[in-house]
């Protein structure tokens, strides 16, 4: 049938009709779209991050093309991303001034889910220009996050290259239409018509300017282009009485994002106040950090990091509720709030962030694929944290000691776990109270002061340095002028057992059987006294009825009649810790106890006179053993019997 219309007009009408006809997503795309809406993203608010990232990519492409062509007047500030809210229509509109799309590109990029024009552009771009732009999209799926919150998505886009403008409309899995449209300049408008509220979901929140502002600041604060939106403000009404001013509300175009992240600035541009203020506002701490670490690393993996060591431990740090991890950004876009894989447990107190474009993200950009880049970053951070902590120890001792009092237990735990795998890394960071210095000292400082004839690094465990200093075993070491490390944390002895030695010097507990203090003459004298009093020692052991594995004479005591030492791997302090952690019917772990007697003390002569009087000897033995326990901070098994025995002696 002849319509009489010119052939070119007939062809134009046919193309318009064809483009306006509703098209279905491919079967694979339908399934992926359903996944996008219901499974891939954890939080609905992510949709805004994804749309802003796409807008940033489109603007980057235009900016890149302008640089390549030498166009003037094109700056990042002149290419804002605009958010508009219309509560009456229940619409959120996001507009950019980027490169836009032709109808064919809409068909390719929006009609085929998981096709990424940004990735293709990035692959074609010269490597030398990639620092100038920050192409974020990789998978071509982020746009469809909009369907999590919108019942209809409309895209109006004008291509920079041809000036062609088209409208893409879809209400989800049913398909989409593409039709001609009008737009004054190149770029894209994405118009979301929000879903109706349900009992479980409130979609009105995405039409609230303050809620939108908080989402932008959380995820997209460091997008390189201004993200602008009209924000409600209040001002004094013109002409109102100054004494009783009237106020009026108005809307003001506001830039919501910071754009240039502090960690991408040169260190020379920043002051300590800049770092401290950023830390306190970002991580809600009212104290300045003890240390900040600013890294800009290039090489096998390129990343920026800004780390902080808090001045004090968070209230929940040593509880199961504490979550370690660094904020993870990719090209300035927040990917994960806490990436635990970037920090080892022994440095879990560190707070901060890492920004890298080299990470292999999963499809939702909320999680990482575990690849070598992540491990390289984590290894680099671990070494840098140790180096900076050692620098703090050297350059600001008081601040380091404050840090160690807050987090030293975590360092000790790190040196102990995994069979001491991290002890070489952490041992130089450890500090202990010193018997001779009366302050915290490092292992290196202790070894540097060791006497020429000193074989061991001596340490003593207990409830507090004050109580440890009163232990009977301390007298001989004090007389010899040997320094002793006081250890009062439950983890201490476990940690030291795992360290075993430092710079070739073995650790030795003052409660160990042999401290290496006796001369040959003293050893021979003790052996002779032991032989002469073996019957007494055997009777005391029998009287204690299995409480000790051995009773022996010692030369380590001076004014005290007795003390407890141990044999084997479990010490008295370890026994106390393990007992406190014992659950239910678990078997009780006990140290192999040795009762050591001072042969020069008057009490020993009293005991010698009781040989043959089993009842009396048992009473004395029980009292001495219980007193030795009390000195070690161990509660007596039967305090009533102990009290009665003491009263019996007093009444004689």
Image (cartoon, rainbow, N blue to C red):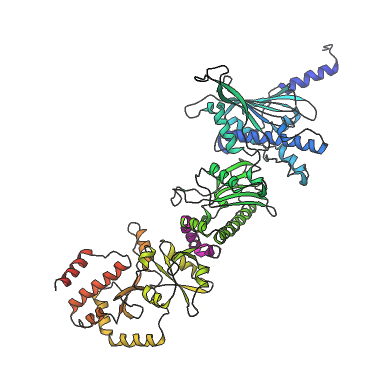
Name the spot of residue 375 as percent of width and height, x first. 61, 54
Residue at (51% x, 28% y) in the render: 202
Name the spot of residue 147 as percent of width and height, x first. 60, 30
Residue at (58% x, 18% y) in the render: 238
Residue at (30% x, 78% y) in the render: 597
Pick out the residue farthest to the front. Answer: 243
Which one is in front, 216 or 430? 430
Image quadrant where one finds the N terminus = top right
User: How many numbered discs, if any?
Assistant: 0
Which SS type dominates the magenta stretch?
Answer: helix
| Res 297 seen here | yes
Name the spot of residue 522 as percent of width and height, x first. 37, 85
Magenta stretch contains residue 312 = no
What segment carries the magenta color?
406-429
Name the spot of residue 99 as percent of width and height, x first. 75, 32
Magenta stretch contains residue 424 = yes
| Res 365 seen here | no
Which one is in front, 29 or 590? 590
Q: Residue 151's image quarter?
A: top right
User: In the shown orientation, is residue 576 left or right of residue 195?
Assistant: left
Check the image and report above or below for 359 versus 439: above
User: In the shown orientation, is residue 289 left or right of residue 302?
Assistant: left
């Amino acid at each position: 049938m002849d319509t009489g219309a010119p052939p070119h007009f007939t062809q134009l009408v046919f193309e318009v009709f064809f483009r306006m006809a509703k098209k279905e997503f491919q079967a694979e795309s339908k399934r992926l779209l359903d996944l996008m809406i219901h499974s891939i993203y954890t939080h609905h608010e992510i949709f805004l991050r994804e749309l802003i990232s796409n807008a940033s990519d489109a603007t980057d492409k235009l900016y890149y093309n302008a640089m390549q062509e030498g166009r003037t007047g094109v700056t990042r500030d002149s290419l804002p991303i605009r958010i508009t809210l219309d509560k009456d229509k229940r619409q959120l509109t996001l507009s950019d001034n980027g490169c836009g799309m032709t109808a064919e590109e809409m068909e390719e990029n929006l009609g085929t889910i998981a096709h990424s024009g940004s990735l293709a552009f990035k692959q074609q771009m010269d490597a030398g220009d990639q620092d100038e732009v920050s192409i974020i999209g990789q998978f071509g799926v982020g746009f469809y996050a909009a369907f999590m919150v919108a019942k209809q998505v409309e895209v109006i886009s004008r291509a920079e290259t041809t000036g062609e403008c088209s409208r893409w409309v879809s209400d989800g899995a049913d398909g989409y239409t593409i039709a001609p449209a009008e737009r004054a300049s190149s770029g894209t408008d994405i118009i979301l018509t929000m879903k109706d509220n349900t009992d479980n979901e409130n979609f009105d929140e995405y039409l609230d300017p303050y809620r939108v502002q908080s989402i932008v600041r959380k995820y997209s604060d460091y997008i390189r282009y201004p993200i602008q939106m009209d924000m409600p403000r209040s001002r004094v009404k013109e002409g109102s009485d100054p004494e009783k001013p009237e106020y009026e509300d108005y809307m003001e175009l506001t830039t919501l994002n910071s754009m240039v992240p502090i960690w991408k600035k040169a260190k020379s541009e920043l002051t300590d106040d800049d770092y401290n203020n950023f830390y306190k506002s970002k991580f809600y701490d009212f104290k300045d950090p003890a240390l900040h670490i600013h890294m800009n690393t290039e090489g096998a993996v390129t990343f920026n990091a800004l780390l902080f060591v808090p001045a004090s431990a968070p209230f929940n740090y040593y509880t199961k509720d504490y979550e370690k991890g660094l904020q993870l950004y990719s090209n300035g876009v927040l990917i994960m709030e806490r990436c635990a894989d970037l920090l080892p447990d022994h440095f879990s107190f560190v707070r901060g962030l890492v920004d890298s474009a080299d990470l292999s993200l999963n499809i939702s950009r909320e999680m990482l694929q575990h690849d070598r880049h992540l491990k390289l970053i984590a290894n680099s951070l671990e070494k840098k944290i140790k180096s900076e902590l050692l620098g703090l120890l050297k350059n600001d001792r008081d601040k380091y000691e404050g840090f160690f009092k807050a987090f030293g237990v975590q360092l000790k735990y790190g040196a102990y776990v995994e069979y001491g795998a991290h002890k070489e890394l952490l041992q130089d960071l450890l500090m202990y109270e010193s018997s001779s210095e009366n302050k915290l000292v490092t292992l290196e400082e202790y070894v540097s002061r060791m006497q020429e004839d000193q074989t061991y690094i001596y340490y003593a465990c207990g409830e507090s340095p004050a109580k440890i200093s009163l232990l009977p075993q301390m007298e001989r070491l004090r007389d010899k002028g040997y320094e002793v490390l006081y250890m009062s944390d439950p983890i201490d002895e476990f940690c030291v057992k795992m360290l075993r030695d430092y710079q070739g010097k073995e650790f030795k507990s003052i409660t160990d059987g042999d401290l290496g203090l006796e001369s040959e003459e003293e050893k021979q004298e003790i052996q002779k006294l032991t032989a002469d009093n073996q019957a007494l020692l055997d009777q005391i052991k029998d009287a204690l009825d299995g409480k000790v594995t051995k009773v022996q004479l010692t030369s380590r005591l001076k004014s005290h009649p007795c003390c407890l030492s141990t044999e084997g791997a479990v010490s008295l302090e370890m026994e106390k810790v393990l007992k406190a952690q014992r659950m239910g019917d678990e078997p009780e772990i006990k140290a192999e106890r040795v009762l050591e007697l001072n042969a020069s003390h008057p009490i020993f002569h009293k005991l010698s006179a009781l040989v043959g009087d089993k009842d009396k000897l048992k009473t004395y033995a029980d009292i001495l053993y219980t007193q030795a326990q009390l000195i070690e901070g161990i509660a007596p098994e039967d305090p009533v019997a102990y009290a009665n025995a003491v009263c019996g002696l007093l009444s004689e």
